[in-house]
Amino acid sequence: MSASATPETAPPATRPKDIKAIPVRHPGRWVVAAVVLFLLISIGNSMAANSRFQWGIVKDFFFSSRILHGLVVTLELTAVAMAIGIVLGVVLAVMRLSANPLVSGASWFYIWIFRGTPVLVQILFWYNIAAIYPHFALGLPFNGPQFAHINATAAITPFVAGVLALGLNEAAYYAEIVRAGIISVDEGQTEAAQSLGMTPLLTMRRIVLPQAMRVIVPPTGNETISMLKTSSLVSVIAVTELTYAAQQIYAVNYRTIQLLIVISIWYLIVTTVLTIGQYYVERYYGRGATRNLPDTPLQRIRRGLRIRHEWS
Amino acid sequence: MVVSTNGDPMVKAEEVHKSFGRLEVLKGVSLEVRPGEVICIIGPSGSGKSTFLRCINHLEKIDAGRLWVDGNLVGYRQVGDKLYEQRASEVTKDRAEIGMVFQRFNLFGHMTALENVIEAPIRVRKLQKRVAVAQAKVLLERVGLADKLDAYPSQLSGGQQQRVAIARALAMQPKLMLFDEPTSALDPELVGEVLEVMKALAFDFQTTMIVVTHEMGFAREAADRVLMMDDGRIIEEGTPDHFFQAPREERTKQFLAAIL
């Protein structure tokens, strides 16, 4: 629009004022919020006022050395079992996609066995493995020469049995997660890499897996959190992880509820930390997939504070 | 660009056949492409154009006939009168000499434009990173994207992505460039920028190019020869002028009338 167009209806010199409308009221939301708040206060009050909760005992045992030791064992179990699960899972997934029917069949068989039996049974099985195989030997079959020899009764401690059972079971599930991730990457990516002269292995490592990570990471966080809690099952073979540590204490002092609260809070704390970690890992592997990475919660808080600051 | 030194045709096809299951897609394709030549292949969808291109780049295996690139048999090794299937490592080596540009760009989504271009030179050609980056910057500047080095594919328009894809293929210094409908997935106003880059390749760098395309304007300006494919065969071949002034086959006339 030029200024010389029509002087009578000259366009305004400035842009119109920002709209300031009265927002739609939502009385229903206030009612629901009030009900929720009332319930929360009631529950909170009943927990705080009920002397049978004996919060003092929860506090006393929260940092007790036996509980903390159990927490460390739980973290070790989770970390080692997940490491076994992830490494073996990736191998199984790649095997499953192999063109060699024996290789993909072996992977299929493994997943069938370990996904098809309860993990509790697998834990008990590994705990008792020495009954069938008292010795492990590395060598050629049919009484050929031996290279290494392990006494199973000594080597398979409850902790090792627990880690093996959890890790090998996890691998079966994780293989399917990785396979889904690999399949989700567009075939054009592989073709482009191949047409540039990249070998299949290089293509998998540099092009396909990094992009599959975007699909693989969220369930990995889920599996890790799940593993943290599933690891409590190894209490049945007397590994003093967090749950078994609590059981040992309340077997003596009968403060069952208090100790269950103690370990529940610990499980929640670790889960929270893992959730935060997962968020940042997802963000890292999401690069390139979205045009703009979303702000991290910290950045969001900082920006909020800055705006407040500018207003005042 | 590297020009063939041994006097062989850059591409030679003799009676190439290819089937997918029971469907025969190529029914005997024969062709010779001289070094430095620009060939455009036109034809209706399903006529086997893209499949033929993919055969040249070992992305598909041929069932019958023979196919050579720069004097080397594609996919096989001939010893006496016996044919041996090539090992994966040999196929990989041959592919590195042939650049390919896809209809859907296929840029690596987790890498920036620059990373896309330097990936293969570093990992396959074993170039030093410093050298690869310098070369990539020259190439990206040549395709007009000097200011987009750090952009991810999702932040680029289709035309920009395709130009990065061309730079990525050129970074391997291929002796042959294959274009599989490079502008078909682009908005009409972005087609021009990609064709400009391709014309520059043809005129300024004498790159041997085989282009599957429906852009008749490009064919007229840049192509030495145009091939019309239909139903798995090359049914007509000639200069661009021949196709625009006096196509011989009825099928070609129909097709040109439909797309022009």
Image: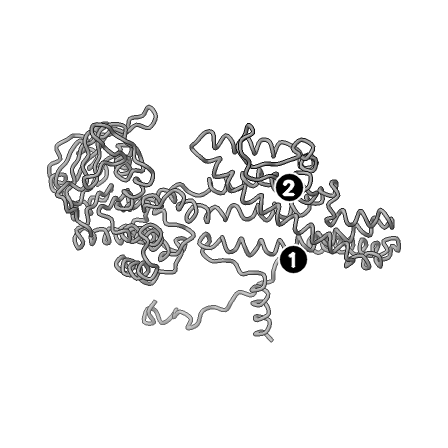
Q: Where is residue A203 in the image (x, y as percent from the top left)?
A: 39, 45
Above or below residue A137? Residue A75 is below
Question: In the image, is residue A80 above or below residue B238?
Answer: below
- Is A95 left, or right, of A272 in this rendering? left
| Percent x, y of residue B251 | 19, 30
3D distance between C-alphas at marks 2 and 1: 53 Å
Left or right of residue B72: residue A244:
right
Q: Mark 2 points at which residue?
A: A166
**Residue drawn at (58%, 31%), measured in percent from left and top?**
A112
User: Residue B99: image x %, image y %?
Assistant: 27, 46
Taking the view exactly as shown, the residue that stands out farthest to the top is B22
Chain ID of residue with mark 1: A
Q: How crowded is mark 2: few (under 14 residues within 10 Å), some or many (20 or more)?
A: many
Report crowding for label 1: few under 14, some 14 to 19, many 20 or more residues within 10 A (C-alpha): few
Amino acid type indicated by mark 1: Arg
Which residue lies at the image location 31% right of the left edge and 52% below the top edge?
A: B125
Question: Which circle's residue, 2 or 1, is located before the other in the chain?
Answer: 1
Residue closest to the far right: A51
Asked whether residue A304 appears in the rendered view, the answer is yes
Which image quarter holds the C terminus of chain B?
top left
Return the residue nearer the eye: A168 or A142: A142
Return the residue at label 1: A25
Q: Is mark 2 on a helix, strand or loop?
A: helix
A169 lies above or below A258: above
